Image (cartoon, rainbow, N blue to C red):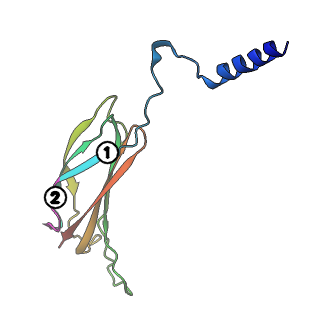
């Protein structure tokens, strides 16, 4: 009787300690932890632009599995210190563009934009000259994200 109990305990231990077999023998997929890459071709760092002109944007987004979305944002760089407002109030140029779906299985995509227009100085809008931050963010299908910042100048 003791031998039967020992055998039963040993057999139960073996059943619990070996994982079940899956059909095809494939292990669970490895999670995607690789961030997408962003290569900005245009504009270049500290490039100068004028009000009324367009900023040519060109970049290549890449990922090892698939791309999901990107964002482009241009905002005035804030410098320290006290700012006094003068009439007419200057309006800092800002821009936001997003694409939320590259499509299934897209691993690399070149984006070319020629419609990032800096408004002309008018009576109601005076574009503040100075340094601006162009921030590009890319997210892959596993929600890994990368961000690249580039300083541009507007006169």
Above/below status of 27 relative to 5 = below
In front here: 93 or 56?
Answer: 56
Identify which residue is drawn at 33% across, 35% down: 66
Q: Which of the two discs, 2 and 1, labels the residue nearer the N terminus?
A: 1
Mark 2 touches mark 1? (CB < 8 Å): no
Kindly identify which numbered label has been placed on residue 36: 1
In front here: 52 or 152?
Answer: 152
Position of residue 100 measured from the top left corner of the image (x, y, whole percent): 37, 40
Kindly identify which numbered label has been placed on residue 43: 2
Identify which residue is drawn at 63% across, 25% down: 17
Position of residue 94 measured from the top left corner of the image (x, y, whole percent): 31, 63
Q: Residues within 10 Å of mark 1 (few under 14, many from 20)?
A: many
As helix, strand or loop, the secondary structure at mark 1 comes to loop
Which quarter of the picture shows residue 91?
A: bottom left
Find the magenta span and give its range.
41-50
In front here: 79 or 55?
Answer: 79
In this image, 113 relative to 11: left or right?
left
Position of residue 55 measured from the top left corner of the image (x, y, whole percent): 17, 57
As helix, strand or loop, the secondary structure at mark 2 comes to loop
Position of residue 62 measured from the top left corner of the image (x, y, whole percent): 26, 41
In this image, 15 relative to 23: left or right?
right
């Amino acid at each position: 009787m003791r031998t039967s109990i020992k055998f039963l305990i040993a057999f139960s231990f073996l059943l619990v300690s070996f994982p079940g077999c899956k059909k095809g023998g494939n292990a669970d997929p490895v999670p995607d932890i690789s961030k997408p890459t962003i290569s900005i071709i245009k504009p270049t760092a500290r490039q100068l632009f004028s009000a009324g002109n367009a900023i040519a944007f060109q970049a290549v987004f890449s990922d090892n599995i698939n791309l999901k979305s990107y964002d482009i944002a241009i905002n005035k760089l804030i410098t320290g210190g006290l700012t006094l407002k003068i009439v007419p109030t200057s309006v800092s140029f800002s821009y936001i563009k997003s694409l939320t779906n590259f499509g299934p299985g897209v691993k690399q995509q070149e984006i070319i934009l020629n419609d990032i227009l800096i408004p002309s100085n008018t009576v109601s809008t005076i574009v503040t000259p100075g340094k601006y931050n162009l921030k590009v963010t890319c997210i892959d299908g596993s929600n890994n994200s990368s961000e690249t910042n580039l300083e541009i100048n507007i006169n």
